[in-house]
Amino acid sequence: MKNSFLASLLWFISVGLFAQEKPKPITLFANVQVFDGTSDKLIKADVLVEGNLIKQISKEPLMVIQTDNVTMIDGGGRTLMPGLIDAHWHSLLATLSLAELMTNDLAYMSLKGAIANEAALMRGFTTVRDIGGNVFSIKKATDEGIINGPRIYPSGAVISQTSGHGDFRSPLTVPENPGQPLDYLQQSGMGIIADGVPAVIKRSREILRRGASQLKVMAGGGVSSNFDPLDVTQYTFAEMSALVEVANTWNTYIAVHAFTDTAVKQALEAGVKSIEHGHLLGEDVIKLMAEKGAWLSMQPILDDEDAISFPEGSPNRAKFITVTAGTDKVYGYAKKHGVKIAWGTDTLFDEGLAAKQGKQLAKMKRWFTPFEVLKMATHDNAELLALSGPRNPYQQGPLGVIKEGAYADLILVSGNPLEDLDLVADAANNFLIIMKDGKIYKNTIN
């Protein structure tokens, strides 16, 4: 009996010991110049990270006891800034060729997408809004720590009308036979074609059921698609209003692909909150966006050395030239009228261009000051992501800022990007430490 009692006592003691919570990892960034995401002035401070959150920011030196769970980093006066956010990223499509997209299954695409996302993280992009594609498995594996990559705000399958920007079926698939199964891209959740109010309601609810944080809808013609000229307005007002209503009932929002005044105006009147692209907009519609508080999620695409590659003489090339000709003008209108501007890349089908993600951010100095650009790619983009409300998958703290209680997504930069924005174009040499969620993924500080 005594032996049995003693064994039980020892068992309870051992369980109690093992059940004790492990101490949270602590990282102290000492002697850094902080860009907090909101101020155009650097602040000399120490920043203490506990677990995955910023615990304390102090202008006086902080002291911690060196234990196994503590990492001390002497910043040497370098710049500490929030992790970057790409508000228009396609994990599965950024590095796939169009031929690979059309001929491979979702498993292959997901593997390439995971590799593309890890590369994005190592460029300092700790969060992305994935604006179209079945990335739910990549997101889950990333959040569980199985693979490395940025936080993902997933849109899931893009919603397109027949002949819309998301209709990548072969030319001979119309008229559609209602008895035939969906094509593979639709079956695999890359996109879905829905026509009419009942269909768009059903499909949007299915995507939200999968875990989308916001919906992506095609509202106008596109460059990379073959059956929709740029001037086409996609979806009727009734259909667009039904999509917005579904998003509203889920307490989130819709982002629409659109370039033209007509397409964007209809989307705004229906209640859309985020316009993706908009490179062909006139000043009056830009004013309307400002009045309605809608976001312009535009990309700094130009017909330059970083142009998306389309065959010379092709309709896609002609559409690309038309779109990029409007970039300068629309950024000017948006800045003039105080429109909320987000930044993203929208890289598609080009591994080399995806590697220039930071360069695409640095290119924004053509229209904005370095402070405006960095605020846009941190604090402002985070504000856009927060429109997902309770669908926001990361609610423990704010993103895009360095402040107490915020997520510890941090970059230690060799130099001052508020003075030299080109530093962000070369993360390999200039980003010495990259931290996401309190975990250091890169540390090359000497």
Image (spheres, grey):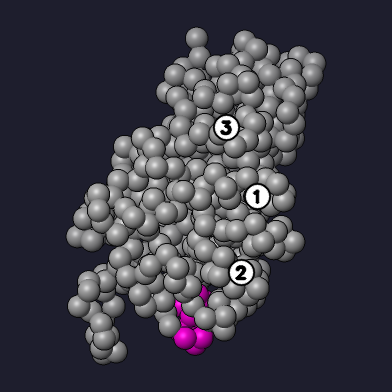
Which residue has dot 1 on it? 334
Above/below status of 333 relative to 270 = above
Q: Is residue 344 magenta?
A: no
The residue at 39%/50% (across/down) is 321
Which residues are drawn in magenta? 196-206
The circle drawn on residue 225 is none
CB atoms of marks 1 and 3 within 8 Å = no
Picture coordinates of residue 441, whole percent (x, y): 47, 30
Q: Secondary structure at mark 1?
A: helix
| Mark 1 / mark 3, whichever is N-terminal | 1
Q: Nearer the viewer, residue 114 or 331?
A: 331
Q: Secondary structure at mark 2?
A: helix
The circle drawn on residue 365 is 3
Above/below status of 327 relative to 241 = above
Q: Nearer the viewer, residue 65 or 28?
A: 28
Q: Nearer the viewer, residue 230 or 91?
A: 230
| Mark 1 / mark 2, whichever is N-terminal | 2
| Mark 3 / mark 2, whichever is N-terminal | 2
* Kind of residue sitting beneath label 3: Lys
Using a 10 Å C-alpha cutoff, classify the residue at mark 3 as few (fewer than 14 neighbours), some (14 to 19) or many (20 or more): some
Picture coordinates of residue 357, whole percent (x, y): 44, 37
* Kind of residue sitting beneath label 1: Ala
Q: CA distance from mark 1 to mark 3?
A: 15 Å
CB atoms of marks 3 and 2 within 8 Å = no
Q: CA distance from mark 1 to mark 2?
A: 15 Å
Q: CA distance from mark 3 to mark 2?
A: 28 Å
The residue at 55%/77% (across/down) is 240
The circle drawn on residue 265 is 2
Picture coordinates of residue 387, whole percent (x, y): 65, 58
Q: Chief secondary structure of the magenta span? A: helix
